[in-house]
Image (spheres, rainbow, N blue to C red):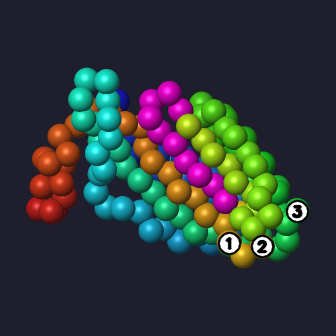
Amino acid sequence: MTPDEAKSSLMSLMESLQTELGGEWRAEDMTGPLSCDLAGGEGIRWSALRFGPVPADLPAAEKASATAAAIFEEAGYTVTTSFQEELGYIVGAQNERGGGADFGANTNAMNISAYSDCVQGDLGAIIDELNRG
């Protein structure tokens, strides 16, 4: 997988989540890649952060977390879910390629923080290209 493919895959996952969960979402994605560790050395990954509509109540937050968990599982992630009184419903997702995500929903907020698979790539060259862009 190339760095562009990793970014595209992450953005597709985020779009799927937003579409299925519904409502208006605000993106606060990082514009550049991050470094990550690969077995053969340093790799790169992309990150995304989205803020969604506030669930009407805890049952709505629970339903949203179940929807997010199902989407992550369908995409090949291992999923853990929990409920914490102060934080609400939390879904953690990890895959075997170094990608992962956290979804949270309560009566005050709903958000998704995710990062792409860790892939080989020249971090410096990609950042230089983005700066020239």
At x 77%, y 59%, the residue is: 84
Label 1 and label 3: CA atoms lie apart by 14 Å
Q: Residue 109 carries which label?
A: 1
Label 3 and label 2: CA atoms lie apart by 9 Å
Dot 3 corresponds to which residue?
Answer: 59
At x 53%, y 32%, the residue is: 95
Magenta segment boundaries in residue numbering: 95-104
At x 41%, y 63%, the residue is: 29
Q: Do the residues labelled 1 and 3 touch (CB within 8 Å)?
A: no
Side of 113 relative to 66 (left or right): left
Indicate whether 17 appears above or below 56: above
Residue 52: x %, y % from top left: 63, 69
Residue 96: x %, y % from top left: 50, 27
Q: Residue 61 carries which label?
A: none
**Residue type at mark 2?**
Thr
Instruction: Say whether residue 11 is visible.
Output: yes
Circle 1: element type: loop
Q: Which of marks 3 and 2 is nearer the N terminus?
A: 3
Magenta-drawn stretch contains 96: yes
Residue 17: x %, y % from top left: 63, 53
Q: Are marks 1 and 2 in contact (CB under 8 Å)?
A: no
**Residue type at mark 1?**
Ala
Q: Furthest residue to the right? A: 59
Circle 3: element type: helix
Magenta-drawn stretch contains 119: no
Dot 2 corresponds to which residue?
Answer: 107
Residue 3: x %, y % from top left: 30, 40
